[in-house]
Amino acid sequence: MNWDKFVWLLLDNAYKYFLIALPFFLVYYVFFRKKLAYRKIQEKFPKQKDYIRELVFSTLSVIIFSIPPLIMLYSDTIRPYTTFYTDIEKHGLIYLILAFPLMLMIHDTYFYWAHRLMHHPLLFKKFHLVHHKSTNPSPWAAYAFHPLEAVVESLIFVVFLFIIPIHGIHLMTFFVFSLVYNVYGHLGFELYPKGFNRHWLGKWINTSICHNQHHQYFKGNYGLYFTIWDRMMGTLRDDYDKKFDEVNGKTCPVKPKSNETVHI
C-alpha cells in the first residue's frame, strides 16, 4: 500500500467532510438554534450522545472511503483497466459536462437498490442499523455508516471507473456535490421553498423532509437525489406531501415588543 497517497486521500476526505458538515451544524444547531427551531422537521434536537456516535462512525467511513481511490487510481496493475482519463480532449468538453447528470442518475439508482437491499431483515442489523440509530439525524449523520455499509457506499467509485469515462474533474466535483446533498438530506431542516414538492420538476427531487421521514419511520423514501425510483416502485411515503406542506407552512413565532402588554 502507498501510505503517503492513502494519508493524503484520508486527509482530503476528512477535510471535505468537516468543511461541509461543520458550517451547516454551526448555523442550524449552535448559533441560530433557537431562532430557527420552529423550522425543525422534527421538533426535538438530537442529544449530545447522538452527535458523538455520528462523528465516530463518520470518521470510520472517511477512512473506508479513502481506500477505493487508492486501489483504483494509484495501482499500476489496476488503473490501466479503468475508464479514468486525464486529457479532456479525449472525450470532449460536451461529454465532460454531460457526464455529471449521468453520474447522478447512476449513483441514485445504485443507492436506491443497495439501500432497499440493506433494509432486508437478513441484512439490516449488520449493515444499516447503525445509520438508523439517527432517527432524528443531524448533518453529522451524512457519513454515519457501519463499516460494512461504508464499503457498499464506497463501491460507487468502482462502478463509475468501470462503466463510463471518468476524468479527475468528475470525481472531485461529483463527490463534493454528493457530500453537500447528503449533508442537506440529514440536515433536519428543509431548504427548498414551499410548494417545491408539487412543482413539475421539484416533485422528482429528493428533499431533506423526504429523507428525514425515512430516518423517522424506517420505511419508504429510499432515494438519494431523486424520487424517481420511489415513485416508480411505489415506495414514496403517502404522507410525504402533507409533511412537506406542514413543515414549510410554519411561521416564525412573533414575540411581543418590550413596551407591549401581553394579555392572558
Image (spheres, helix red, strand yellow):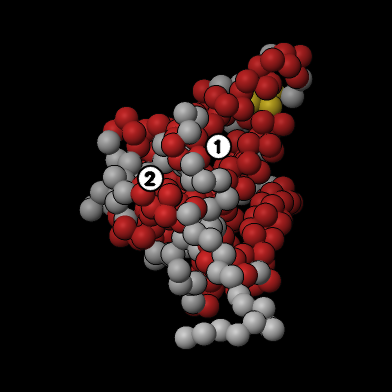
Quadrant of residue 63 within the rendered picture: bottom right
Q: Is residue 103 left or right of residue 232?
A: right
Query: Which residue is depicted at the point 60% across and 36% down?
Result: 72
2 or 1: tag closer to the N-terminus: 1
**How many other residues sit within 10 Å of disc 2, few (<14), some (14-19) or many (≥20)?**
some
Query: Which residue is depicted at the point 49% across and 77% down?
Result: 47
Residue type at mark 1: give it: Phe
Query: Which residue is depicted at the point 55% across and 24% down?
Result: 102
Residue that carries the numbered disc 1 in the rendered image: 157
Q: Is residue 175 left or right of residue 130?
A: right
Q: Say the numbered circle drawn on residue 241.
A: 2
| Label 1: element kind | helix
In this view, 5 is above or below 53: above
Where residue 197 appears, as percent x and y from the top left, is 45, 40
The residue lying toward the viewer, choosing from 137 and 173, is 137
Where residue 263 appears, as percent x and y from the top left, is 52, 85
Q: CA distance from mark 2 to mark 1?
A: 33 Å
**How many other residues sit within 10 Å of disc 1, few (<14), some (14-19) or many (≥20)?**
some
